[in-house]
Image (cartoon, helix red, strand yellow):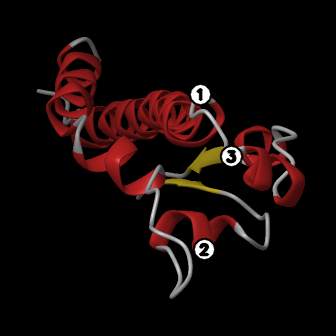
Amino acid sequence: ETDRTAEVLMKKDAAVTKALAVIALKAEANAKKEITRKVYDVKQTPEQEKRYKRTGRLRNSITSSADGNSAQVGTNVEYGPYVELGTSKMKERPFIKPAMAEHIDEYKEIFERILKNA
């Protein structure tokens, strides 16, 4: 009888990599929805409009990536952490954490479905 362990492990690794890539893209989309809801869809006072221009830069900077071990979602915009975590003068408006935490069941389902179909 032929040992197919190596083949099975390769298929499993490929399925995990694919699942993480799909999850990363879904989490990126969820983060963009969160930032839109918490920042861009919020009515600003005239003073806020003068101080803070909403250009879409933060939302557009949200990206994702995945490898065989993990999926990442983030931004390289320097003020992203201040929006996510808040400051002593600005309340937090998290968009990355909820995009991950509030959709765990969805990500598990994606992972399980892709592994089952491998």
Decide: is 35 above or below 72. Answer: above
Label pair 2/1, CB-CB below 8 angstroms: no
Circle 3 residue:
62
Q: What count of labels does the image hold?
A: 3
Give the x, y percent position of residue 3.
19, 36
| Residue in view at x 18 percent, y 33 percent | 108
Q: Residue 44 appears at what percent x and percent y?
A: 66, 41
SS under mark 1: loop
CA distance separating discs 2 and 1: 18 Å
Question: Would you place residue 70 above or below residue 79 in this image?
Answer: above
| Residue nearer the viewer, 93 or 24 | 93
Closer to the camera in the image, 40 or 106? 40
Q: Quadrant of the N terminus?
A: top left
Q: Could you say where residue 5 lies in the image, as x and y percent from the top left?
A: 22, 40
Do the numbered discs 3 and 1 sit on residues whose CB atoms are within 8 Å?
A: no
Residue at 78% x, 38% y: name it. Answer: 60
In the rendered image, the vertical position of residue 6 relative to residue 91, given as above or below: above
Which numbered disc, 2 or 3, marks the residue that appears first in the sequence?
3
| Residue at the disc numbered 1 | 41
> Which corner quadrant of the image does residue 19 belong to?
top left
Residue at far front of view: 46
Q: For mark 2, what is the residue?
A: 82
Which sits in the foreground, 31 or 40? Answer: 40
Residue 67 x/y as whole percent: 54, 52
Q: Nearer the viewer, mark 2 or mark 1?
A: 1
